[in-house]
């Protein structure tokens, strides 16, 4: 698959900002922290037979922007984001968009769904890989650790879990709420390959996704909530608040910087 140009990433970031601004809804911070990975994953690695589960469903706008960049959604679709009667809800909808197979958003469920899907693909003899994007806050959930145990026990070498480790969740930092740090050290005690990378370094993302996979893999993406928008970077408000007029116009210019 061709490598995504940086200019294409900038266009997707701007469209993401526009979508949130026009709809007047929040949850932009986590979308910005995960957008780079989603773009590279979908444009450069995912095949049609592969599956993607967005466990951190509150960042679905990044997925919509990614599908828009692929031509699978258009501007008229994005203009309905989070509005009444839309198919582009604030969490992944069920039976509305071809690429979205599972409705998620109750944190801690997506990894289990992905693990079951990976096992089903293997049992059915399907040449399919499964990718799941979780938040770091989800690793405070018992169901996430149960899915980890299951994935290791079943030796799911067709499963990759991506962790958007931006350090913030709904009520504060992950270290303040229920620290699991260092997450990589805790996970590495299991039968799993663990990589820790800069989740905004395009080369690092490409390298981690391209590494040959022989067993279940977890890639921890060290990211910045609200990445690229200084008014939102590393701020809890980016989890909730929409962009003001001033913030939006400043952000549109700011995200063009490499």
Image (cartoon, rainbow, N blue to C red):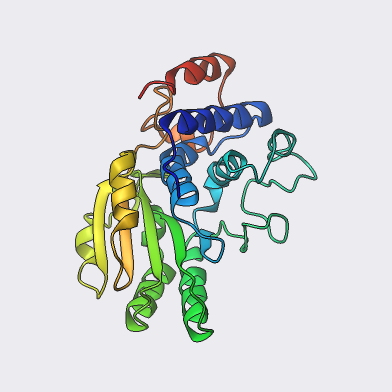
The quarter of the picture where residue 94 lies is: bottom right
For the residue pair 215 and 188, the one nearer the viewer reads as 215
As drawn, is 255 to the left or to the right of 57? Answer: left
* Residue 176 is at least partly visible in this image: no
Quadrant location, the C terminus: top left
Residue name at image x 37 percent, y 54 percent = 163
Residue name at image x 32 percent, y 78 percent = 152
The quarter of the picture where residue 257 lies is: top left
Residue 161 percent location from the top left of the image: 39, 62
- Counting the numbered discs, the total is 0
Q: Is residue 166 above or below residue 92?
A: above
As drawn, is 180 to the left or to the right of 228? Answer: left
For the residue pair 255 and 46, the one nearer the viewer reads as 46
As drawn, is 224 to the left or to the right of 90? Answer: left
* Residue 36 is at least partly visible in this image: yes
Q: Is residue 17 above or below residue 146?
A: above
As drawn, is 255 to the left or to the right of 26? Answer: left
Residue 58 percent location from the top left of the image: 55, 48
Q: Residue furthest bottom?
A: 123
Residue name at image x 55 percent, y 28 percent = 17
Q: Residue furthest right?
A: 85
The quarter of the picture where residue 142 lies is: bottom left
Residue 92 percent location from the top left of the image: 62, 53
Residue 119 percent location from the top left of the image: 47, 80
Residue name at image x 72 percent, y 61 percent = 95
């Amino acid at each position: 698959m061709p490598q995504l140009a940086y200019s294409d990433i900038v266009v997707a970031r701007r469209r993401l900002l526009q979508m949130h601004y026009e709809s007047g809804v929040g949850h932009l911070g986590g979308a910005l922290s995960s957008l780079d990975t989603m773009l590279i994953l979908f444009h450069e690695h995912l095949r049609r037979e592969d599956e993607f589960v967005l466990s951190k469903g509150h960042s679905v706008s990044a997925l919509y922007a990614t599908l828009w960049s692929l031509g699978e959604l258009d501007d008229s679709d994005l203009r309905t984001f989070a509005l009444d009667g839309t198919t582009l809800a604030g969490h992944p909808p069920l039976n509305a968009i071809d690429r979205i197979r599972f409705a998620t958003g109750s944190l801690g469920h997506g990894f289990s769904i992905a693990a079951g899907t990976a096992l089903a693909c293997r049992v059915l003899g399907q040449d399919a890989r499964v990718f799941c994007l979780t938040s770091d806050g989800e690793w405070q959930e018992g169901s996430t650790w149960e899915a980890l145990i299951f994935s290791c026990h079943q030796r799911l070498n067709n499963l990759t879990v991506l962790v958007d480790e931006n350090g913030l969740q709904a009520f504060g930092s992950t270290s303040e709420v229920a620290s699991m740090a260092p997450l990589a050290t805790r996970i590495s005690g299991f039968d799993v390959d663990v990589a820790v990378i800069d989740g905004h370094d395009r080369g690092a993302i490409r390298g981690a996704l391209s590494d040959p996979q022989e067993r279940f893999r977890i890639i921890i993406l060290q990211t910045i909530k609200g990445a690229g928008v200084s008014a939102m970077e590393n701020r809890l408000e980016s989890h909730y608040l929409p962009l003001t007029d001033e913030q939006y116009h400043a952000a549109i210019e700011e995200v063009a910087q490499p």
